[in-house]
Image (tube, rainbow, N blue to C red):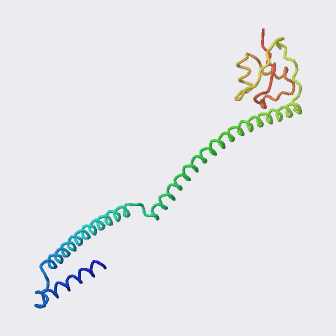
């Protein structure tokens, strides 16, 4: 604003000096030279201000470019939310794997316990049914041997298989194990199996 005021004042002064013939004769060469120096100084100041203005414009453009490259706050929040979601998905997957492994282990343990309980129950039921069997006592076979072995029934055994493996006879086993039902043997059951010397 000050610059414009000085400039207009000088312009008016120059106009007044050159427009009136009476004034032109009164102004000395020294005053005219001073005015020309002032105009040159003003031109220099205008050039400096123009340079400064261009520098400010360039700085402003650079700052605008930097501002445009910065992450938009909404984008930044979206990225953080996406990152948190990914972390939660990973934590959930890890937790699912841990729970699944733990559950599998518990199921295996429970399966073993159930199998044991079923085997115990089967033994108990067979023992009770053997004790309450209505089977008639078997008379001692004429060729009954005096020696034999104790045999623990395994899964898949039948009385026929036991007889074949141990070179025995059904009549010997039934006589040696009173109340035994040949169709109801079970794993874990202990039998005396007579054998020839």
Quadrant where the N terminus sits is bottom left
Q: Nearer the viewer, residue 137 or 155?
A: 155
Above or below, 133 against 146 in this view is below
Residue 3 location in percent, x, y? 27, 77
Vertical arrangement, residue 19 with respect to residue 140, above or below: below
Name which quarter of the figure residue 125 lies in: top right
On screen, residue 12 versus residue 154, left or right, reads left
Quadrant including the C terminus? top right
Nearest the viewer among 136 and 44 is: 44
Q: Give the percent coordinates (x, y) of residue 162.
A: 73, 22
Which quadrant holds residue 19?
A: bottom left
Please tell me which residue lies in front, 140 or 164: 164
Residue nearest the observer in this picture, 28 or 34 = 28
Q: Is residue 65 above or below residue 109?
A: below
* Residue at x-position 76% and y-position 17%: 168
From the viewer's perspective, is 160 left or right of 145? left
Residue 51's spot in the image, x, y percent?
24, 67
- Please give left or right for residue 1 compared with residue 150 in the image: left
């Amino acid at each position: 604003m000050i610059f414009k005021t000085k400039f207009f004042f000088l312009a008016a002064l120059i106009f007044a000096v050159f427009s009136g013939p009476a004034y032109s004769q009164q102004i000395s060469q020294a005053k005219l030279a001073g005015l020309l120096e002032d105009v040159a100084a003003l031109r220099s100041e205008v050039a400096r201000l123009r340079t400064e203005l261009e520098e400010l414009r360039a700085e402003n453009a650079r700052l605008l470019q930097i501002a445009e490259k910065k992450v938009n706050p909404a984008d930044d929040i979206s990225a953080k939310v996406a990152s948190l979601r990914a972390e939660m998905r990973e934590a959930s997957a890890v937790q699912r794997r841990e729970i699944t492994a733990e559950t599998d282990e518990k199921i295996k343990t429970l399966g073993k316990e159930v199998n044991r309980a079923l085997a115990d129950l089967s033994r108990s039921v067979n023992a009770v049914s053997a004790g309450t069997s209505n089977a008639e006592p078997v008379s001692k076979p004429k060729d009954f041997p005096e020696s034999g072995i104790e045999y623990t029934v395994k899964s898949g055994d039948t009385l026929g298989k036991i007889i074949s493996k141990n070179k025995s006879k059904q009549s010997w086993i039934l006589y040696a194990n009173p109340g035994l039902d040949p169709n109801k043997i079970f794993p874990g059951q202990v039998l005396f199996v007579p054998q020839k010397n």
